[in-house]
Image (spheres, rainbow, N blue to C red):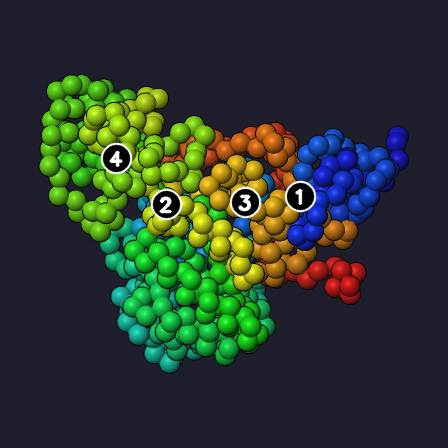
């Protein structure tokens, strides 16, 4: 029997190690789930992958996902695991399923349904509810196996309802006793292995029956009290999403005071608002000043527009609020396509006036000047002459006719794309500025959420294709910059120092990528959730192999069946040899 020094060798690849330094050609040897050697001419491995001409990178670390439900019923955390991601952090935006009393199960499901567009029947059938406390929830995950690693945050909405009941759900101010109880639970959660705590302060987050999230107006005393519970535990990061209204400076100043009091690292979502396209600059300046003062703060930013998808298979389409469409909305897709292709029905639909209901529907469903046709090769930085309005004018038809025709393509599976964040000026120049800033990290992929409207779990792939190779409308980023952003920098932001670099002694979480062939396909619909639930997925070509803890989990985009992923309980230190450097 051959005597192999390594379990796995990636042979002759171009190593982009996550540090931001220049790529270099080397072999990477793996043993016992760790990177054991990096060099040329390494001894044979029990398994080898020819990486010549390919990139060898750390596995991507995605710190903004919502797999809180999916992780309790599924072993594959895709779409993220199909895009080179080897570690995810879930429980963002203050929503999740622990702690939770039995009588509040439906309340938290309705909140997740409204905030993250995961249908009630999916969650009702899928969630086993074998826990009450947050440590119980972690224990339930501990016994499961996955294709990637995952870490969980304590969600503020669940915590608030658990402690305050109806008062918490109704956004009443927390009493000193409430705050003391929440702080104690937060401390216990961090000590049990929560990676952090998350909250939401945005009106965009509502329950499925339209109520604002329970955390929307939580006071500074409440947030500080919880952060002080984390300080007592000596661990955990804070994650916040906010509208930053009515006074962005005052909101940020509160975040800064919470960090000053607790010492816990804090990140917040930063994106360009189309209503105030320059406000992100003010927040970035305030962040820079806080970091210069020694505070551990970051902004989570994204490298493409945050956009909603509309289609006949999806949650919404431009005709969702038409009475005529309502006549067929309940029918299977093929029957709806038949009706919408009938000239008489089509004429009645297109001739009908509609009074849009709801703030989002009113602004988005017929925003033809900011809506694009989703193609098989998605363009996430389209020009103004590609809008539905511009294309319709060029073809001499009405925009709603063009939209309907596109949705009817491929048996009714055509989709429309409406960017509502990060595209206020019709370009990604603001994203470039945010990604290039020293105090930001990539975030907001929302993997596992928005299953019928948004498909941004593919962010890691579009970061590599668009910013390092395909962009034509402005400056690009180097491969080493993009790899560092979504490996070492995201890992450091949440304290996972045992991964995110191709370095000896670190976890062997790795990707082998054909950069030239890397291709992101259009979103598609799959019906593979509990109760036959629908979700958006998005495939990519060019990932030769993804490796988790030294085990190949994907080859050429197909799962191998290996499930080496585990729950990560809390922060992880760097190996002693690295820590001493």
Closest to the observer, 239 or 186 = 239
Tag in front: 1 or 2 = 2
Q: Position of residue 349 (x, y in %)?
A: 14, 29
Q: Could you tell which of marks 3 and 2 lies nearer the N-terminus?
A: 2
Judging by the rendered image, the residue that carries numbered circle 2 is 426
Residue 319: quarter of image:
top left
As drawn, the label of residue 57 is 1
Report, in whole angstroms, how far the alpha carbon at label 1 lies from the one at label 4: 41 Å
Lower sequence index among marks 1 and 4: 1
Other-residue count near label 3 (Cα within 10 Å), few / some / many at <14 / 14–19 / ≥20: some
Examine the rendered structure and indicate whether residue 115 appears above or below residue 295: above
Find numbered disc 1 in the image and state the secondary structure of the residue it sits on.
strand
Q: Do the residues labelled 1 and 2 touch (CB within 8 Å)?
A: no
Q: How far apart are marks 3 and 1 (CA)?
A: 19 Å
Q: Are the residues at dot 3 and dot 1 in contact (C-beta closer than 8 Å)?
A: no
At 73% from the left and 37% from the top, the residue drawn is 13
Q: Which residue is drawn at 43% across and 28% down?
A: 376
Q: In this view, does 399 lie to the left or right of 265?
A: left
Marks 3 and 2, Cα distance to the nearest angstrom? Answer: 17 Å
Please name the residue that numbered disc 3 is placed on: 476
Crowding around mark 2 (Cα neighbors within 10 Å: few <14, some 14 to 19, many 20+) is some
Q: Distance between the residues labelled 4 and 2?
A: 14 Å
Secondary structure, mark 2, is loop
Would residue 524 be found to the left or right of residue 401 on screen? Answer: right
**Residue picked out by circle 4:** 389
């Amino acid at each position: 029997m051959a005597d192999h020094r390594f379990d796995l060798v990636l042979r002759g690849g171009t190593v982009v190690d996550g540090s931001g330094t220049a790529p270099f050609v080397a072999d990477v040897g793996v043993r016992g789930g760790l990177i054991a050697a990096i060099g040329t001419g390494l001894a044979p491995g029990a398994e080898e992958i020819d990486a010549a001409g390919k990139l060898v990178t750390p596995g991507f670390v995605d710190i903004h996902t919502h797999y809180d439900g999916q992780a309790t019923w599924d072993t594959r955390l895709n779409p993220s695991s199909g895009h080179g991601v080897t570690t995810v952090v879930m429980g963002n935006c203050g929503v999740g399923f622990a702690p939770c009393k039995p009588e509040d199960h439906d309340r938290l499901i309705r909140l997740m349904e409204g905030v993250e567009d995961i249908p009630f029947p999916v969650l009702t059938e899928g969630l086993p509810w074998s826990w009450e406390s947050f440590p119980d929830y972690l224990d339930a995950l501990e016994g499961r196996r996955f294709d990637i690693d995952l870490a969980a945050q304590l969600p503020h909405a669940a915590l608030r309802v658990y402690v305050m009941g109806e008062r918490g759900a109704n956004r009443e101010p927390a009493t000193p006793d409430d705050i003391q109880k929440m702080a104690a639970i937060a401390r216990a959660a961090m000590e049990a292995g929560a990676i952090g705590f998350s909250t939401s302060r945005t009106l965009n987050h509502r329950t499925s029956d339209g109520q604002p999230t329970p955390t929307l107006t939580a006071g500074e005393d409440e947030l500080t009290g919880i952060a002080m519970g984390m300080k007592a535990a000596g661990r955990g990061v804070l994650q916040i999403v906010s509208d930053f209204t009515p006074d962005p400076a005052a909101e940020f100043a509160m975040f800064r005071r919470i960090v000053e009091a607790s010492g816990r690292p804090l990140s917040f979502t930063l994106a360009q608002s189309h209503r105030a396209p320059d406000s992100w600059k003010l927040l970035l300046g305030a962040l820079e000043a806080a970091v210069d003062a020694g505070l551990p703060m970051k902004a989570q930013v994204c490298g493409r527009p945050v956009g909603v998808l509309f289609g006949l298979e999806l949650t919404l389409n431009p005709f969702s609020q038409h009475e005529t469409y309502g006549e067929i909305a309940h029918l299977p897709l093929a029957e709806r396509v038949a009706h919408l292709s009938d000239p008489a029905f089509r004429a009645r639909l297109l001739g009908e006036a509609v009074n849009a209901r709801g703030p989002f529907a009113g602004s988005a469903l017929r925003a033809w000047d900011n809506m694009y046709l989703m193609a098989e090769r998605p363009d996430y930085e389209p020009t103004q002459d590609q809008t539905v309005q511009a294309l319709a004018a060029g073809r001499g038809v009405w925009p709603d006719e063009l939209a309907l025709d596109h949705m009817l393509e491929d048996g009714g599976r055509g989709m429309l794309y409406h960017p509502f964040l990060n595209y206020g000026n019709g370009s990604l120049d603001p994203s470039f500025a945010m990604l290039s800033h020293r105090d930001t990290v990539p975030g907001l992929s929302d993997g596992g959420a928005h299953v019928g409207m948004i498909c941004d779990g593919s962010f890691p792939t579009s970061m590599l294709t668009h910013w390092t190779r395909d962009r034509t409308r402005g400056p690009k980023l180097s491969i080493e910059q993009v790899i560092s952003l979504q490996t070492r920098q995201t890992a450091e932001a949440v304290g996972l120092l045992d991964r995110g670099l191709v370095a000896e002694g670190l976890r062997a979480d790795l990707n082998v990528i054909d950069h030239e062939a890397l291709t992101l396909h259009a979103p598609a619909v799959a019906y593979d959730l509990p109760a036959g639930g629908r979700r958006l997925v998005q495939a990519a070509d060019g990932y030769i192999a993804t490796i988790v803890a030294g085990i190949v989990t994907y080859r050429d985009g197909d799962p191998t069946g290996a499930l080496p992923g585990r729950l990560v309980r809390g922060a992880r230190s760097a190996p002693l040899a690295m820590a001493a450097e």
